[in-house]
Image: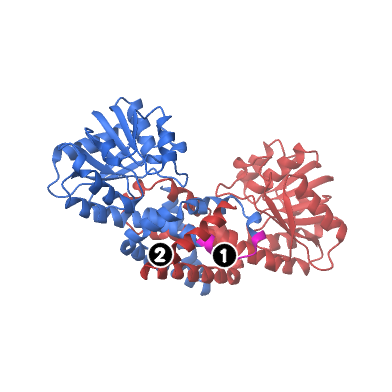
Chain colours: A red, B blue
Amino acid sequence: MFQQISILGPGLLGASLALAMKERGLCQRVHSWSRRAETRLQAMQADWCDAVFDQASAACEASDLVVVCTPVETIIPLIEQVTPSLSPEALVTDVGSIKGLICREAQSLKVNFIGSHPMAGSERTGMAHASHNLFDGAACFITPLDGDNEAEIAQLQQLWQAVGMRVVSTTPEKHDEIVAHISHLPHLLASSLCAYLARMDANWKGLAGGGLRDTTRVAAGDPTLWKQILEQNHEEVLRAIDGFENELQALKGALLDKNTPELIARLERGKQFRDSL
Amino acid sequence: MFQQISILGPGLLGASLALAMKERGLCQRVHSWSRRAETRLQAMQADWCDAVFDQASAACEASDLVVVCTPVETIIPLIEQVTPSLSPEALVTDVGSIKGLICREAQSLKVNFIGSHPMAGSERTGMAHASHNLFDGAACFITPLDGDNEAEIAQLQQLWQAVGMRVVSTTPEKHDEIVAHISHLPHLLASSLCAYLARMDANWKGLAGGGLRDTTRVAAGDPTLWKQILEQNHEEVLRAIDGFENELQALKGALLDKNTPELIARLERGKQFRDSL
């Protein structure tokens, strides 16, 4: 499918993609670049990696696919930096959790960029947790813009399908609206719940059951990465918070008014949604 | 430890307790009663059960321990009903998720009642999911009142310790405050998040990653049981919601004001709490 691919920032997603592509014979060679020397050393010892570079541009030379897997704030600067070294036909994508800003800015660069967002992250980051089946059965957004090359869109779609994903094509703006609700809001709620409980008696946490652990697992995610995601998607995130607050207010109202049918109806609606996940 | 125990309402918790006690030789005989004929039939076929009764009072005759495992609203009515059949020295406890109302009302009955709350529930209810190691390593509240018999308090504590639990003794009111925060609030947030997302495009849920599934798992709990818990603990639950709303407002403020240090500090505080769970 590809001769040579470049993974810029091989963490959980990038290293897993390289593993999955190698295992399925989807590429011949994998080049990688990381900002940190320690990660470059790790990549040198990894089976999926054929060559490690100190400079991102050198890692991208002659590749037919470049996948940018760095934190969202650094995706565009990195693409700008490597653009002069890219083959004219190289396809560039990313795995960032927001798409609007990235896709709009990439459009003004001389590069064949189409955004991707595989929904296969985890609160456990880093190459050490990489797995060739990380993507199996999960959803992947691709967010082409009007005028993007149809063959390249098809190629990107086939790539994610080939590593086991269900691919959904939508606009960057719609993507950002959807993930604000199904990913960023749940993260914010888990994180705020933890930040709130952190102010209580420290002994309480030893008393919690499995429910609290599940509900808050994602709050262990890296604050620096999440701050970037939330800031870059802040309009949609704020809208999602507002909607959630209204829902919580209504449930509080049902409790305050001792409106049992209303309380049950709301819990029932929540259960039905959860059972259907 | 006990000659004969009675489990009233053997669901996940009651059947697991009987299993755990039998396996550890903590009781000779287990009597059980259920409201539903179907559950009585199931109990008749279960290894942990020696006799099944149609009447709760008959199930309690000559027992030295009675454990009430029914939904919280029915605990006091059931204790009232069986009181005339109890041995004078029988110890009565429950596994209800709220303690204030139950313990206050039980105090006016002629019964040796001390409240318990093993934090070992699950969104999966029913005898079919019972396990002899359900309680292993989990916390259990006991909520004796002033004037309760010291020997009985010690016996109850030893029982929960013997099935593997870490026992914490506190007042019913303190218990209700704590679980409002570490159990009822997380449930409400998960449920409200699901109820909110249920109003969105139905296709969105197929796009969610593992984070949303974890965050909302508890929302699959039985709405009828949860409505009783939330209503019986509604003062503490409302207080916990208010506190959480303030936390969420502050995080929203940091996003609105693009106050990055504040946003990171809040995410960091949440992560630290979660990592320490």
Q: Is residue A152 magenta?
A: no
Secondary structure category for the residue under label 1 = helix
The residue beneath circle 2 is A260
In the rendered image, the vertical position of residue A217 relative to residue B128, given as above or below: below
Instruction: Give left or right: position of A227 versus A98.
Output: left
In the rendered image, the vertical position of residue B252 relative to residue A112, given as above or below: below
Task: Locate residue B231, reporting x and y percent.
Answer: 35, 61
Tell me which residue sits at (37%, 57%) in the image.
B228
**Chain letter, disc 1 residue:** A
Tell me which residue sits at (40%, 41%) in the image.
B11
Instruction: Give left or right: position of A57 versus B152.
Output: right
Crowding at label 2, few (<14), some or many (≥20) Cα neighbours within 10 Å? Answer: some
Tell me which residue sits at (48%, 63%) in the image.
A266
Tell me which residue sits at (39%, 35%) in the image.
B16
Q: Mark 1 belongs to which amino acid?
A: Leu
Between A192 and A83, the one lying in front of the other is A192
Q: Which mark is residue A162?
A: none
Q: Mark 2 belongs to which amino acid?
A: Thr
Which residue is most to the bottom? B257
Do marks 1 and 2 both belong to one polypeptide chain? Answer: yes
Crowding at label 1, few (<14), some or many (≥20) Cα neighbours within 10 Å? Answer: many
**Chain letter, disc 2 residue:** A
Q: Quadrant of the N terminus of chain B?
A: top left
